[in-house]
Image (cartoon, rainbow, N blue to C red):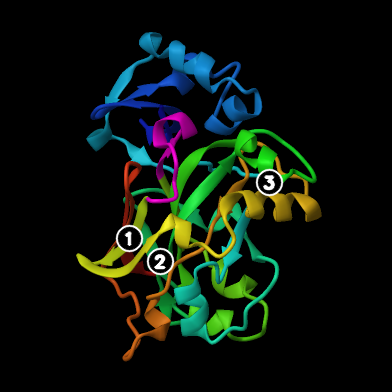
Amino acid sequence: MRFTSFQTNGAPTWGVIEGDEVLDLGSVLRDRYPDLKSAIVAGALQQVGESASEAPRHKLSAITWLPLIPNPDKILCIGLNYETHRKETGRTEVENPTVFARHANSQIGHLANIIRPRVSQDLDFEGEVAVIIGKPGRYISRDAAWDHIAGYSLYNDGSVRDFQRHTHQFHPGKNFPNTGALGPWMVTPDELGDLGKLRLQTRVNGQVVQDALIEQMIFDIPRQIEYCSTFTRLEPGDVIATGTPGGVGAKRNPPLWLKPGDTVEVELDRLGVLRNGVADEG
């Protein structure tokens, strides 16, 4: 199944996608599951999917997409996780994942504009696969990691590079408002299957700028879950952005910075396309 968060008639809600429509589960289950995260916490996704026949339907073309999980407890991002990206940055090999965090209020949904802040021109793209945690845990083993996944989505980890480079800490450049896109929907593991051979691609104005197979990750998804659950308790609805391949704008010659009017697309085979425009901060 494919679940999403969206807004209709000015009200946030969530639902399950069928074809070119979304069934508004939030409107019929609001007392029990007011948002997608609450359904994940309750382990109720299969149950609510079976209740979909009672829900109002909306055309996808008529909704406003929200970040898939608008209210995660945490967003953990894995840096330098493809060899092509590690090499283009000149970073040394490491034994453990590089992890930084995003704030929930830095996120936008599908079709919303990524905002270039007034204090920088160095706005970059990073297409990634996002893992949505479905079951809580600490010290999760690699073998058990798959059981803690509710589903997969797409992330554009928009980066304000000059602020990212101010210190060795990535945090400022990764948390400007309206720079991290998450969506358009979450695909459950049974539908997506084995990720290894799936192709992750990022396009700017139709030009392919990043292209990799998921199996090319340095630290695979079970290792990421194992490592992250060691230093923090993973909670249902948490998001792990699993890293971006080489080809980022900052490492091109000349650099390819995002500018107003651009369109960025992140696509994963069998999952779909996350699409966002770019605009200047007002």
Secondary structure beneath dot 3 equals: helix
Taking depth in this image into account, of 114 and 206 the one nearest to the observer is 206
Q: Position of residue 215 (x, y in %)?
A: 46, 57
Distance (Cα) linking label 2 and label 3: 37 Å
Q: Which residue is mark 1?
A: 201
Q: Residue at x 44, y 46 (%)?
A: 195
Question: Tag 2's secondary structure?
Answer: strand
In the image, is residue 17 above or below residue 162?
above
Residue at the far bottom in the pictured view: 254
Nearer the observer: mark 2 or 3; the answer is: 3
- Residue 78, percent across and down? 59, 63
Between the residue at mark 3 and the residue at mark 1, the CA separation in whole angstroms equals 26 Å
Is residue 201 positioned above or below 53 on the image? below
Q: Which residue is mark 2?
A: 115
Q: Earlier in the sequence, mark 2 or mark 3?
A: 2
Q: Which mark is residue 142?
A: 3
Residue that appears at 73% across and 44% down? 141
